[in-house]
Amino acid sequence: MRKHPSIIIAVVALGAMALVLVLGRSISAHRLRAKCYFQDARGLRVGAEVRVAGVAVGSVTSVRVRPDLRDHPAEVEMLINTSYDLKIPDDAVVSLESDGLLGNLFADINIEHASGRPLAEGGVLRTRESPAMADWLQCVSNIMDHKPCDLRGRAESSKPGPPSVPASR
């Protein structure tokens, strides 16, 4: 009995597609969506990097204004996408940083003092407002006038979720 070449080709093609699907899932083993809320998103753009410990682990997928959240109306959605299982503690803190003075903005997830449970899919992280360029310029001006300069007193949201009242650090 003679087999049809088209059947053999179809079986090989299906096998190749199955192999690609299996390998594709193992390459991207960890995907997690998370949100955070800022007073000012400072020009953060969709596609900006998300970093943990200086390592790019994902990207910003949405930046939008939520007028109903007056204290922290800038909603940032992130997608963590790594080839390994990355458990970000739910008490980690996100800040907006830049690569140098004129570098690109990115979302930096600080896990240094975090010890909470792993963040759930769609979870919300606390934020810390980073000094803006105007704050840096004011600091330099203060130093030139022999006045103190402290950029550490930036507000951090007190709890996960859309924050209503920031807590002082």
Image (cartoon, helix red, strand yellow):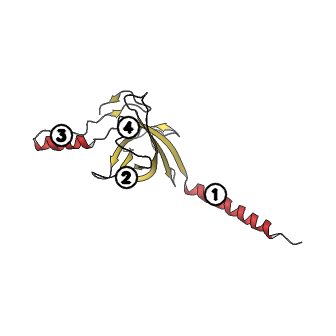
Distance from disc 1 to disc 3, alpha carbons, whole Å, reads 55 Å
Tag 2 secondary structure: loop
Label 3 vs 2, first from the N-terminus: 2
Label 2 vs 4, first from the N-terminus: 2
Tag 1 secondary structure: helix
Amino acid type at mark 2: Gly
Q: Front-most of 148 and 65? A: 65
Q: Quadrant of the N terminus?
A: bottom right
Amino acid type at mark 1: Val
Distance from disc 3 to disc 2, alpha carbons, whole Å, reads 26 Å
Tell me the number on the disc at residue 22: 1
Q: Which residue is mark 4?
A: 127
Q: Quadrant of the C terminus?
A: top left
Tell me the number on the disc at residue 149: 3
Residue 139 location (% of width, % of height)? 19, 42
Q: Is residue 100 left or right of residue 37?
A: left
Snapshot quadrant of residue 8: bottom right
Q: Which residue is mark 2?
A: 54
Label 1 vs 4, first from the N-terminus: 1
Residue 5 location (% of width, % of height)? 79, 70
Label 1 vs 3, first from the N-terminus: 1
Amino acid type at mark 4: Thr
Residue 99 location (% of width, % of height)? 32, 52
Tag 4 secondary structure: strand
Q: Residues within 10 Å of mark 3 (few under 14, many from 20)?
A: some
Q: Residues within 10 Å of mark 4 (few under 14, many from 20)?
A: many
